[in-house]
Image (tube, rainbow, N blue to C red):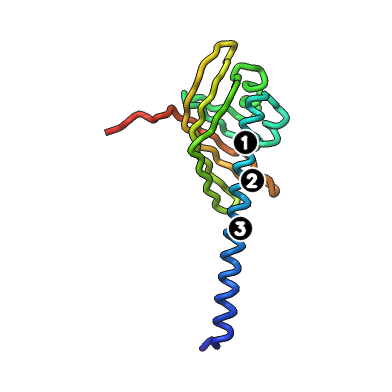
Amino acid sequence: MKISAPIKSLIAIASLFACVLSTASYADDAQTLDNRVTALTKAMIDADGKALKALSSPALSYGHSGGHIENQAEFIEKITSGKSDFVTINVSEQTINVSGDTAIVRHILNANINDGGVPGTIKLGVLLVWQKQNGDWKLLARQAFKFPPPVTQ
């Protein structure tokens, strides 16, 4: 079956339009995710349990650089109780990659902490996995690692 030139042009225009819409949607999701990361860091500094719950999935798997893993309730309790007390959080070198309803966010986290009343500083690499649930991006998983990572040969 031969496709006429006007139909080929229409198909090309429709494909281009779909591509433009996809790019715009990606940019919107990336900006929304950047805002979600900012809201997450603010909620962690403020020890705002309500905000932490709203930003995270009930299925959250929150991994620490030392290997300890928490669920959503444990993560929120540790922050709101002051066991994990973030005084400041600065995020740098952030990348955001969206694939459908899943996004991977990576960054370097520098923070001043006061865990259990003991001041300190940390520098970690962080991987965040966000999932769009009912139209809203929720933190599904987080894994931190010591930064810079050890050099392997």
Of labels 3 and 1, earlier in sequence is: 3
What residue did someone put label 2 on?
32
Amino acid type at image mark 1: Thr
Quadrant that contains the C terminus: top left
In percent of width and height, residue 18 lies at: 60, 67
Instruction: Tell me if 140 is positioned left or right of 92 in this view.
Output: right
Q: Is residue 113 above or below residue 62?
A: above
Viewer-closest of 65 and 18: 18
Q: Secondary structure at mark 3?
A: helix
Q: Is residue 43 visible?
A: yes
In percent of width and height, residue 1 lies at: 52, 88
What residue did someone put label 3 on?
24
**Residue shown at the point (67%, 31%) measured from the top left:** 52
* Number of other residues with Cα within 10 Å of mark 1, as a class: few under 14, some 14 to 19, many 20 or more: some
Whether the residues at callouts 2 and 3 have beta carbons within 8 Å, the answer is: no
* Number of other residues with Cα within 10 Å of mark 3, as a class: few under 14, some 14 to 19, many 20 or more: few
Q: Secondary structure at mark 1?
A: helix
**Residue shown at the point (61%, 31%) measured from the top left:** 41
The residues tagged by marks 2 and 1 sit, at their Cα atoms, a distance apart of 10 Å
In percent of width and height, residue 53 lies at: 69, 32
What residue did someone put label 1 on?
38
Of labels 2 and 1, earlier in sequence is: 2
**Residue shown at the point (57%, 15%) measured from the top left:** 115
Amino acid type at image mark 3: Ala
